[in-house]
Amino acid sequence: MAPLTPHWSQPSHPDIQEVVINEAAFTSKSLSKAVFPPFGVFAKLDFPPCTSADEPTYATVQMGRDAHLNLNSDLLYINHSCEPSLIFDTGNLNILVGPKGLQPGEELTFFYPSTEWHMAQPFDCLCGTPTCRGRISGARDMADAQLEGLWLNGHIRELLEERNSNKSTATAAAVSGKNGVSSNGTTAAAVSENGTTAASNGNGYLPLQGKDKTAATAVNGSDQTAQALHSAVEQAEKMVEAARHALVMYFRGLEGQQQQQEGALRRGPTSRELSGEMGGDTAVSV
């Protein structure tokens, strides 16, 4: 598939984005032109210039189960990275800055599977980061461990839960057939990995103990749905902590600006005043 020829006025975001065009196909990139705090809004996905896409292509962004959009701007030149600097929050039509913030000259990237369930044009990632995932073809083809710690859009999380639920159902059916079930089709007890039994609450989890922070422990460690939910909780906690830190730093910055303004209003005596040239302290001979 040939690279897309821009049909919009360039630059489309001159205050925040610098586009670096390279001759080789799919090697252009974008750099930040401004400073942004963690989780600040980098840009809005406004309609227009965005438009709904009739079908997904390598240049569209998925914004729902069956919904895709055309960016129609230089935002198209934001590349993929397995350690992205941006978050495409398609549910709220925002592009957010990642937890590290942004400085001028830093490359603008986002994690493509955070929006794309199945990509029209898969590729081998060359981001070179320590956590590089290799082949990128969409969240559908990635294991939960590969998505751990990454921000994912709501439609991707829902599709992952459905995928993992289907796997869990198939696994449970296979285990039931192997271990035997009661006459009404239910197992009498859940069997843990070490061979002991534990009382089951009907969904494969041990009963909650008060307000246990871990929420629940899967009886079977291979329960993909449990792992996905635990990963979601851990990721949410990390994002809350990062956002809390960003908020503290923001208020500290405001406090510093206020102190500077107050200092500017408190004018001390000038050198001319101290030397007696102002204020009537100098005697004048008549």
Image: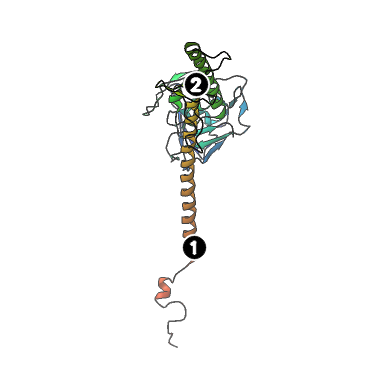
Answer above or below: position of 247 versus 210: below
Q: Quadrant of residue 93?
A: top right
Of the residues shown, which amino acid type is indicated by label 2? Ala
Total marks shown come to 2
Q: Which one is in front, 156 or 262? A: 156
Q: Quadrant of residue 53?
A: top right
Of the residues shown, which amino acid type is indicated by label 1? Glu
Query: Disc 2 to disc 1, how far (Cα)?
Result: 70 Å
Residue to which mark 1 is pinned: 262
| On-image quarter of the C terminus | bottom left
Whether residue 7 sits left or right of residue 194 in the image: it is: right
Q: Which one is in front, 20 or 215? A: 215
Q: Earlier in the sequence, mark 2 or mark 1?
A: 2
Residue to which mark 2 is pinned: 189
Which residue is most to the bottom? Answer: 286
For mark 2, give the secondary structure.
loop
Q: Which one is in front, 231 or 122? A: 231
Q: Position of residue 226 (x, y in %)?
A: 49, 26
Q: Position of residue 182 (x, y in %)?
A: 54, 14
Q: Position of residue 201 (x, y in %)?
A: 54, 26
Which residue is most to the top? Answer: 177
